[in-house]
Amino acid sequence: MMRGRFAPTPSGLMHVGNARTALLAWLQTRSAGGTFLMRTEDVDTSRSRAELAEQALADLRWLGLDWDEGPDVGGPYGPYTQSERLDRYEEALAALERAGRLYSCFCSRADLAAVASAPHGLGSEGAAYPGTCRALTPAERAERRLRKEPSLRFAVGAAPVRFDDAVAGPQAFPPGAGGDFIVKRADGMISYQLAVVVDDAAMGITDVLRGADLLDSAPRQLRLYEALGLRPPRFAHVPLLFGSDGKRLAKRHGGISLAALRDAGAAPEQVVGWLAHVSGLADTDEPVPARELIPRFHIGRVPAENVVVTDELLRRLLRE
Ligand code: GLU
């Protein structure tokens, strides 16, 4: 049985871009008769706020989505809030340590900035780490530790990564692509990459549908699944919404948070109809309740190209 999820980071208001990803993930799972869950991804406590996590759930409920498990409704794989799952991430780190896949890294921001201009690497986490600290001797590590708390890096190994993305198509990443990445920061923060793998596996997620900005995280996560002996999910990375200026749709493009749309008098069916239209699921942007899209959904209908929200389309959303 399919198990899908939506996993927002509560660092801002839910806007139409996030809502679209949530809607598509929900439709994918509901159209397969599966179980859908919500998870709050707040490992980065400096960016996350509890009231925004609550607001995200309220906004998505307003839109017409529902979930079988989640921070507010509980479920057999809880807790569904990452800041309450730190012991699980520590267990995974211990397993990676036993497997010889972790090393301490003492590089400073300035050291890393020096390699950031190199033309390699995978976008979302900056330049590939060149492996500077991988070869330190135990004595060198001990000496450095006296002066600086290290971060922990995962040694990605030499194997290439291939997978078939349900929207983006076949993917092939060369050996070492992206470089060894941080799984725990020097200040103790667990990385998104580790937390998401531990949680998706522990929560039995079979299908991950999320924004294409995370496509280059998938090979990192697949390497973690492999190193931890866990079964990976199928991935579907959906293209993002862009403004007519070519930038990712964001606050500066106008009142596009769900909260602002609701306050301006928009009905959820209107927002859903618009989202379905810009996502290739409906020919027009006529209002439609989310549940009526369930029988119409097919992952093959989600276009693999980025969606440009023209000013005209934006005006239709805002009913201007
Ligand atoms: N928490 C991530 C975000 O809000 C999503 C993680 C995921 O879907 O894998 O961007």
Image (tube, rainbow, N blue to C red):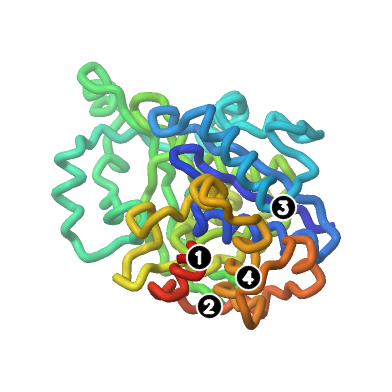
Residue 96 lies left or right of residue 289; in this view the side is left
For disc 2, the marked residue is 304
> Pointer 4: residues within 10 angstroms few (<14), some, or many (20+)?
many
User: Does label 1 or label 2 sit earlier along the sequence?
Assistant: 2
Q: Residue 64 bears which disc, if any?
A: 3
Cα separation between marks 4 and 3:
13 Å
Question: Disc 3 marks which amino acid?
Answer: Gly
Foreground pick, 195 / 236: 236
The C terminus - image quarter:
bottom left
Q: Nearer the viewer, mark 1 or mark 2?
A: 1
The amino acid at mark 4 is Ala
Q: Residue at x 76, y 46 (%)?
A: 67
Q: CA distance from mark 4 to mark 1?
A: 16 Å
- Please name the amino acid that badge 2 sits on: Ala
Q: For the residue marked with disc 1, what is the amino acid?
A: Arg
Q: Residue at x 61, y 74 (%)?
A: 285
Quote the CA–CA distance across marks 2 and 4.
15 Å
Q: Could you say which quadrant of the image residue 75 lies in?
A: top right
Say which residue label 4 marks.
276
Answer few, some or many: residues within 10 Å of disc 1's Cα (few below 14, many 20 plus, some between 14 and 19).
few
Q: Earlier in the sequence, mark 2 or mark 3?
A: 3
The residue mark sitting in front, 1 or 3, is 1
Sequence-wise, the earlier of marks 4 and 1 is: 4
Q: Is residue 172 found left or right of 165 in the rendered image?
A: left
Give residue 120's position: percent from left, percent from top.
Answer: 26, 64
**What is the crowding at mark 2: few (fewer than 14 residues within 10 Å), some, or many (at least 20)?**
some
